[in-house]
Amino acid sequence: MKSPFFFILLSLITGCTPSTLKLESLLRLAPPEDISVQCKPDSCQISWKASIQENEKEFAGYKVYISNTSLLFASPGQLPTPITVGKDKKVVSFEKPVKTVFIHVRSYSTKNKLSLPSLPEIKAMNQPYKKSLVF
């Protein structure tokens, strides 16, 4: 008799579950690249390079997520309210955090589909001009 894991794996491969559709939409949209954060005494600035799909018709822009906890394993429903910008913008400024914050940027489409998060996740601390990476 096969283990339950085998049947779960088989259903994911053959596309028999609704969660496969969510995974497929995440994989179709590429996230932006080379995320960086620069902090000054009062504010921080996040910048990135464009997604490789930015010129496609359905590409809408970017969503920047900032949280007090890591967002690496957060599902789309668990993400905080993002800073949303159009595809022509590659820089976002925000008030310098009192505590450490975790940042990632995702691409989104005109159909409101999200990409996977930009990697690695950025960890911004309350120190000027400090950038730290979380793996």
Image: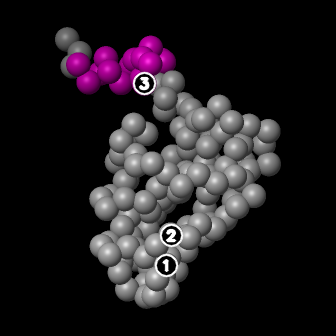
Give the residue at mark 2. 94
Nearest the viewer among 109 and 117 is 109
The amino acid marked with disc number 1 is: Ser
Dot label at residue 19: 3
68 vs 56: above or below:
below
1 vs 90: above or below:
above
Give the residue at mark 1. 43
Dot label at residue 114: none
The amino acid marked with disc number 3 is: Ser
User: Gap in Å between the C-alphas at discs 2 and 3?
Assistant: 34 Å
Label 2, residues with CA under 10 Å away: few <14, some 14-19, many ≥20: few
Do residues under tags 2 and 3 come within 8 Å of each other at their CB atoms? no
Does the image show residue 73?
A: yes
Residue 61 is situated, as x and y percent measured from the top left of the image, at: 67, 49
Q: Secondary structure at mark 1?
A: strand
What span is colored magenta in the figure? 4-19
Residue 117 is situated, as x and y percent measured from the top left of the image, at: 49, 51
Residue 123 is situated, as x and y percent measured from the top left of the image, at: 38, 70
Earlier sequence position, callout 1 versus callout 3: 3
Left or right: 124 as drawn, with respect to 63: left
Kindly report the secondary structure that dominates the magenta region of the rendered protein: helix
User: Gap in Å between the C-alphas at discs 2 and 1?
Assistant: 6 Å
Label 3, residues with CA under 10 Å away: few <14, some 14-19, many ≥20: few
Q: Secondary structure at mark 2?
A: strand
Q: Secondary structure at mark 3?
A: helix
- Indicate how the structure is coloured in the image: one colour
Label 1, residues with CA under 10 Å away: few <14, some 14-19, many ≥20: some
Nearest the viewer among 80 and 73 is 80
Do residues under tags 2 and 1 come within 8 Å of each other at their CB atoms? yes
**Residue 18 in magenta?**
yes
Could you tell me which quadrant the C terminus lies in? bottom left
Earlier sequence position, callout 2 versus callout 3: 3
